[in-house]
Image (tube, grey):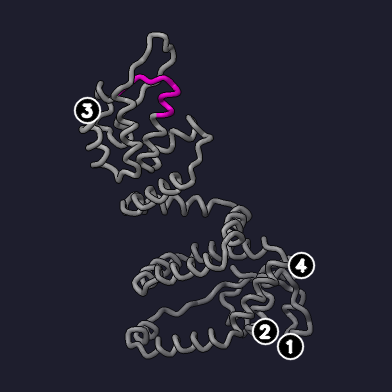
Amino acid sequence: MRDYSFLKIKFSEKHTIDNVEYLEKYIKLLLEYRLCESDEYTEKHHILPKSVFPEFENEDWNIIELKYEDHINAHLFLFKSINIRQYQRPLNWMLNTYKNREEISNAAKIGWINLKMDSDKYSEWCRKRSDLMKKLPIEEQRRRANIFWNNISDEQYLNFSQKMKDHWTNDKRMEKSKKMNEHYSNPDNIIKKSIEGKKRWNSITEEEREKFNAKMDEINKDETKRKDAGFKIKELWKNKEYLEKMKNRKSNPGKKIKIIKPDGQEIIIDSMLKLEKDYSISLHLIRKYRDKDIYIEEKYLKNNKLLLNCKIESI
């Protein structure tokens, strides 16, 4: 019904009011609104928006005819009073010059909080988002990632890192580990991941590879990190549950290896260990040449020259 108290109560029941003054302006505008006979073009407006109040969608008292300019003001007053996405979207095309950063940011935060509170909707959103990202070309994924990393300050990076540390509790780690084990129990997923990794590595420039290798070298030579990692590993081996888990773990056959001979012939080897044994080549050299698109040189081979000028790829 078109009653001030009724309408204000209904909005208050559904929302946190961000600006009471603008809510009062919104209700007052509609309650006192009168059309002139000369007004030719009008638009219908739901006083209690049907996106939030579907139960009143077809009520005659909830539908009002407004001139276009007044219709814009109604939506503007409503969004200023209650900063949520549903009330901001109409302004994207009705008043696309209106860009109040604080209100739009507030609407985004509220929408994000509401989405996370609905576990079913949030899970569905995560699934769709994941499917979308997987379909994006590698170049587009890298472009998006670079936008984030190129525009983050040192302070924001530290805050981001701390949030990630706080997020990954032991329970979260165990849950993720379980899901990863289930995922990679399927051999097809292992092959798919290997192909994705190879495409990613081949798509980056030589400069980017050098930066990555330099960064990893810096991390691996950091004495503090090495001592910290060593301490954590020692503590793990003191845990009885961890010891039992490691004792009962399934053996990993390792990745299959493809040898590409100079004439194009391909030979499939079941594992790196078998390649090492059958062709008298060290694991170090296998890693050096694997997936690098470079030919094996004679100086690195011992008596067995079967791998001369061959390439090694993971499968």
Residue hosting label 3 = 3
Place of residue 253 in the rendered image (x, y in percent of width and height, measured from the top left): 50, 77
Q: Give the SS element for disc 3.
A: loop
- Whether residue 64 is in magenta: the answer is yes
Whether residue 259 can be seen here: no
Place of residue 187 in the rendered image (x, y in percent of width and height, measured from the top left): 48, 66
Q: Give the SS element for disc 2.
A: loop
Camera-nearest label, 3 or 2 = 3
Q: State the extent of the magenta-drawn residues as a range.
A: 63-73
Q: Is residue 315 left or right of residue 104?
A: right
The residue under label 3 is which amino acid type?
Asp
Residue hosting label 1 = 302
Circles 2, 1 touching at the beta carbon (< 8 Å): yes
The residue under label 4 is which amino acid type?
Asp
Residue hosting label 2 = 281
Q: Quadrant of residue 143?
A: bottom right
Residue hosting label 4 = 263
Direction right: furthest residue: 298
